[in-house]
Amino acid sequence: MASWKPPTDNSLHAPFRNGQHFCCYPKTIVMANFTIESFLYLFDELIIGSTKEPTWVIDGGSDGGLLGTVGKVNAREASEPVNQHDATIAGHTEHVRWALEYALTLLEGRKPAEGWSASWSITSIEEKEWDSLQKRLREAYQRLRDHISNRTVWPAPDQMTGLLSVLPHTAYHLGAVRQMVIRL
């Protein structure tokens, strides 16, 4: 039996088995369009919200995503910890922005410059900085989304796992922020 080799033309025109594309490695099966479209649908829902039905993760329509949720609070509210040692809304927002940039950097094959602890550096924020942070979150989301949409060859399994982890990670922080907003 001949061993399978990844495509050399940077495309997903790899051999099929049972109607599924092989990705870059023989044991990794990716149903390319379904997986990417599903990822992007959930990613959009978590970050920008959704006006479509059904929603899979959030409620609240377009205000239910992270951008809509943080857009409801001002800088003073975003700087108030719910409990003395908790992160603030601004801190969670910066951490998610950082995580999206981190994922993009890895997918582009570069080494991220900042570490995890730096992503929690924001605790309080002024109004102008708060507006800027929300804009940078939207930009990080859009850059990662565009990269995923335009990519034709997918990474090794551990990189794909890292990409998929963006969804539960973002959902966790969205939930934390929404709980903090309720308590304001």
Image (spheres, grey):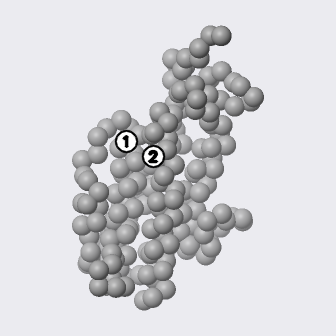
Residue 106: give its label: 1
Residue at 63 percent of width and 47 percent of height: 37
**Label at residue 61:** none
Residue plotted at (35% across, 50% down) = 102
Residue 34 in sight here? yes
Q: Which residue is identified by label 2? A: 162
Percent coordinates x, y for residue 107 in the rendering: 41, 40
For the residue marked with disc 2, what is the amino acid? Gly
Q: Position of residue 159 (x, y in %)?
A: 45, 40
Q: Is residue 146 in view from this perspective?
A: no
Q: Are there few (<14), some (14-19), or many (20+) residues within 10 Å of tag 1?
A: some
User: Where's residue 93, x and y in %?
Assistant: 38, 68
User: Where residue 117 sits: x, y (%)?
Assistant: 25, 60
Q: Residue 108 occupies which quadrant of the picture?
A: top left
Q: Nearer the viewer, residue 38 or 147?
A: 38
Residue placed at 48% from the left, 52% from the top? 165
Where 103 sits versus 85, above or below? above
